[in-house]
Amino acid sequence: MLQSLASFFFDGGIFMYAILASGVIGLAILIERTKLLLFNFNVDAHALWDRISRSIEDGHMEQAAGQCKDLRIPLLKILHNGISAARGDEKAVQNAIDEAVLEVMPSIDKRISYLATLANIATLLGLLGTIQGLIQAFSAVGSAEPSQKAELLAKGISVALYTTAFGLIVAIPLLIMYSLLTARAHKITDEIDEFSVKLINLIAKKKELLRQRHEPALPEPPKEHPKEHKEPPKHKPAQHPTEE
């Protein structure tokens, strides 16, 4: 088995080494990104939000911030920044969240696009090795001795097929994992957007309720009674005494 793999690799020519280098670099990126996105950044966002929202509604802001203490996780860092700025106005909360988003977003998308690039490079290197093998094959047919034509033709075709196959073997898994990791990164980003807006709205709602409780109710203005229209007194004509 190992001998067959070694023969497959060495018979493919110089481009097999370039394809192998692309695969090794892609594998290193794949392991690092998979560990980070699927394990280190993994959090049950909805369950976390249920706990945080209950703490905020009860007025326990420190307890809510304590549930976001693992600042290595992007969502927790953003929520922690927003809760820490809750004493300010809504603009201060928004600025704190925006600052945290700008800080953590590069760590989510970092190096994922390299997987697609390396997959394309491996495919193109395989194609280039195919062209090299076909050139060798046709050169053998045109210039070699008749007794050696078959051997050189087979060797050229093997180079063409081996490099193509090895390029696809490297490229296909990289493209699959690129799609999976991109979907995972988008899910984390969507959760950040969703729960950041929910946090801003919840803090604003809580402040509005506290403001309404502490403001005294304004007294109702006195009701105006309709004024009765009184007719002016009628003046009786003066009576003159009659002469007897």
Image (cartoon, rainbow, N blue to C red):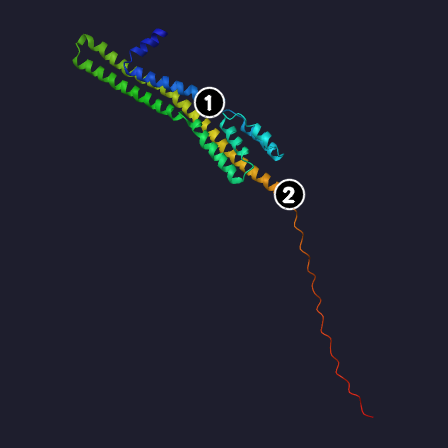
Give the mark toward the camera: 1 or 2.
2
Give the amino acid at mark 2: His
Most distant residue in the right direction: 244
- Which class describes the residues within 10 Å of circle 1: few (<14), some (14-19), or many (20+)? some
Residue 51 is drawn in which quadrant?
top right
Can residue 50 be seen by looking at this rendering? no
Most distant residue in the bottom direction: 244
Q: Position of residue 204 (x, y in %)?
A: 56, 40
Q: Nearer the viewer, residue 159 or 85?
A: 85
Give SS at disc 2: helix
Q: Nearer the viewer, residue 56 or 175?
A: 56
Q: Position of residue 78 (x, y in %)?
A: 50, 31
Task: Give the residue at mark 1.
Answer: 36
Q: Quadrant of the C terminus?
A: bottom right
Give SS at disc 1: helix
Q: Earlier in the sequence, mark 1 or mark 2?
A: 1
Can residue 2 be seen by looking at this rendering? yes
1 sits to left or right of 236: left
In the rendered image, the vertical position of residue 230 relative to residue 42, given as above or below: below
Q: Nearer the viewer, residue 156 or 195?
A: 195
The residue depicted at 58 percent of the width and 30 percent of the height is 64
Q: Quadrant of the N terminus?
A: top left
The mark tally for this picture is 2
The residue depicted at 26 percent of the width and 14 percent of the height is 157
Rounded to the nearest whole Å, what is the CA distance between mark 1 and mark 2? 46 Å
In the rendered image, the vertical position of residue 240 relative to residue 75, given as above or below: below
Task: Give the residue at mark 2.
Answer: 214
